[in-house]
Amino acid sequence: MLRIDDKLRPVLDDVVRRNAGEPEFLQAVTEVLESLGRVVAKRPHYLDNALIQRLCEPERQIIFRVPWVDDEGNVQINRGFRVQFNSALGPYKGGIRFHPSVNVGIIKFLGFEQTFKNALTGMPIGGGKGGTDFNPRGRSDGEVMRFCQSFMTELFRHLGEYTDVPAGDIGVGGREIGYMFGQYKRLTNRYEAGVLTGKALFHGGSRARTEATGYGATYFVERMLATRNASFDGKRVSVSGSGNVAIYTMEKVMEFGGIITACSDSNGYIVDEDGIDLDLVKEVKEARRERISEYVRLKGGRSHYVEGGSIWNVPCDVAMPSATQNELTGNDAKTLIKNGVIAVGEGANMPSTPDAVRLFQEAGILFAPGKAANAGGVATSALEMQQNASRDSWSFQQTETRLATIMHDIHDRCAETAEEYGAPSDYVLGANIAGFVRVAEAMDALGVI
Ligand code: GLU
């Protein structure tokens, strides 16, 4: 890992001073600023007009009360957030997370990452993120609906197809997007399909959007493996998580001939030496909304469940962390390296700690950072916006082909940028610099705003 360039040190010091108590946000900013030393050495004009300082400060942050009534008739209060980080390249774009851990620092880190990720896609989308500390676990369908309606009752005034376009993230899938779209439509009296992505097909959703993040991460890693004449074929692959990203990562890895041996949820992980039965995972997680331990109860055979502990103790050739931030620590990285991992592809946002990233890179392991590898979800959201704008609906095949091309382009742009800046195969550097340059150019041309 690089150290901060002297010219960027005051920028980081200022960000640290102004955002105390937001470790995830500071982690994300530090990683990007570490990569930018080589850019400002080559192109010092990026230090002008406080451009980098402006890039580290969200354009707008909205925090609001979300009151709702639970099934017992009690009034519950949650906190809602929307961080509109950067709109130099297009309307703010990024998901909404429902998880009890959500706070303003987490939404800021996600919005910051999203800005670079969205720039990397090459599509006309700015960066933003939203969320709430509402915990959907164990809540009835009616409670989730009333929560979504209350959340949108404040958020709607900040959105619009040309202003800010949310989508899903952890805890927010098609059901929640449907409830939020319904409330938006009711409040505005507009059928404005382009205001949210991840919609159902009959509301103007895009085919392949559900699959896109996981499929995209797999396309990215397959192309990265090819740089070393390797592929997923016959490889043992561990995918942490068992939500939307993990499920469709597993599906595409299997299509590429990989063998999924382990996946997880926040309670523990499962190992199946016969290869994970994905239909059963979908049944447990998507249809029944149950814990992953149910898989072992239903499947038996050579599968087993480990409560707690780390999925990264399971030996694998390729690791795809697809659960949440900082889930893969330095110790996990050491174990994976000892067990012979050859590549790591981040399906989640910032799932590897800085220590873990450093260890992978020092060991010469191929490492694909989330802001590049998981960009397929938001890229397909941008395709959904295109379909909404033209009132069109593309086939699955057409959409997936576009997604594959976008992921290959992102891969190649990161690899070429890393090469250009003297760090071949450093996808962290390549992604940070390529994303930064696109946003910086767009900001610069708008003047000081
Ligand atoms: N939440 C996803 C992400 O982290 C998707 C965002 C979107 O489609 O707008 O990129």
Image (tube, rainbow, N blue to C red):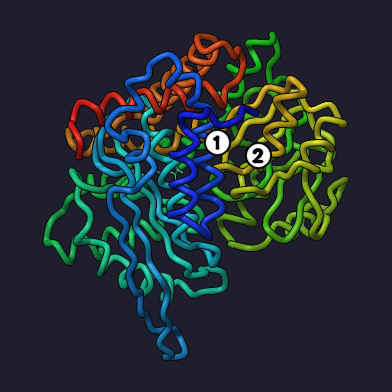
Return the residue at label 2: 354
Task: Kindly report the distance in space between the C-alpha atoms of the residues bearing marks 2 and 1.
Answer: 8 Å
Q: Position of residue 340 (x, y in %)?
A: 84, 26
Residue drawn at (26%, 68%) of the image: 154
Residue 221 x/y as whole percent: 60, 24
**Which quarter of the rendered picture does the C terminus lie within?**
top left
Q: Closer to the camera, 35 or 320?
A: 35
Which residue ends up furthest to the left in the rendered image? 189
Q: Residue furthest bottom?
A: 73
Q: Residue at x 62, y 43 (%)?
A: 351
In this view, the residue in front, 392 or 1, is: 1
Quadrant in which residue 31 is drawn? top right
User: In the image, ligand 1 is in what quadrant?
Assistant: top left
Left or right: 10, with 270 as reference point = left
Residue 323 in view of the camera? yes
Indicate which disc, 2 or 1, sits on the residue closer to the N terminus.
1
Q: Is residue 203 visible?
A: no
Measured as percent of width and height from the top left, residue 245 is found at 55, 43
Is residue 316 toward the left or the right of residue 211 in the image? right
Q: Residue at x 42, y 40 (%)?
A: 114
Residues under numbered marks 2 and 1 in contact, where contact means CB atoms less than 8 Å apart: yes
Give the left or right position of residue 54, taking residue 76 as reference: left
Quadrant in which the N terminus appears? top right
Q: Position of residue 149 (x, y in %)?
A: 31, 70
Does 278 appear above or below 256? Answer: below
Q: Which residue is mark 1?
A: 31
The amino acid beneath tag 1 is: Glu
Residue closer to the observer: 284 or 233: 233
**Against 395, is 282 above or below?**
below
